[in-house]
């Protein structure tokens, strides 16, 4: 049986958190790399502290969150 425990955040989790940071800072161009790196660091810290899930994911009772349509456009520039 496969081990379902994750030691590191997935690309999708980092992508979603980076998008959340983008929205929090008011959007706009630039800052995408900083958003990604900060999101990756933040999530890695959560995983190393043993939480592994965001507060929102724990309260929702699910690990999988649907990506907003805007996130899909950011992650796939050809879709714009």
Image (cartoon, rainbow, N blue to C red):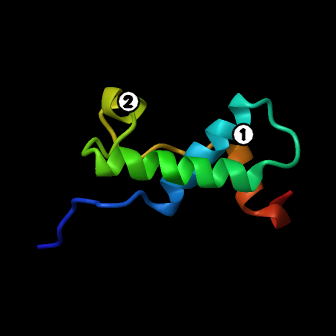
Earlier in the chain: of badge 2 and badge 1, it is 1
User: Residue 57 at what x, y percent from top left?
Assistant: 38, 35
State the residue at coordinates (29%, 61%). Answer: 7
Q: Which mark is residue 55?
A: 2
Is disc 2 placed on a helix, strand or loop?
helix
Mark 1 highlights which residue?
22
User: Residue 23 at what x, y percent from top left?
Assistant: 72, 33
Is disc 1 placed on a helix, strand or loop?
helix
Is residue 67 in sight in this rendering? no
Pointers 2 and 1 in contact (C-beta within 8 Å): no
For disc 2, the neighbor class at 10 Å (few under 14, some 14 to 19, many from 20) is: few
State the residue at coordinates (41%, 57%). Answer: 9
In the image shown, does 58 or 18 lie closer to the viewer?
A: 18
The N terminus lies in quadrant? bottom left
User: Which picture quadrant has residue 63?
Assistant: top left
Left or right placement of residue 56 versus residue 1 in this view: right
């Amino acid at each position: 049986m496969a081990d379902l425990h994750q030691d590191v955040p997935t690309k999708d989790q980092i992508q979603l958190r980076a998008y959340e940071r983008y929205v929090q800072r008011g959007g706009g161009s630039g800052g995408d790399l900083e958003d990604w790196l900060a999101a990756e660091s933040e999530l890695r810290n959560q995983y190393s502290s043993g939480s592994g899930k965001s507060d929102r994911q724990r309260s929702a009772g699910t690990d999988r969150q649907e990506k907003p349509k805007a996130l899909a456009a950011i992650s796939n520039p050809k879709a714009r």
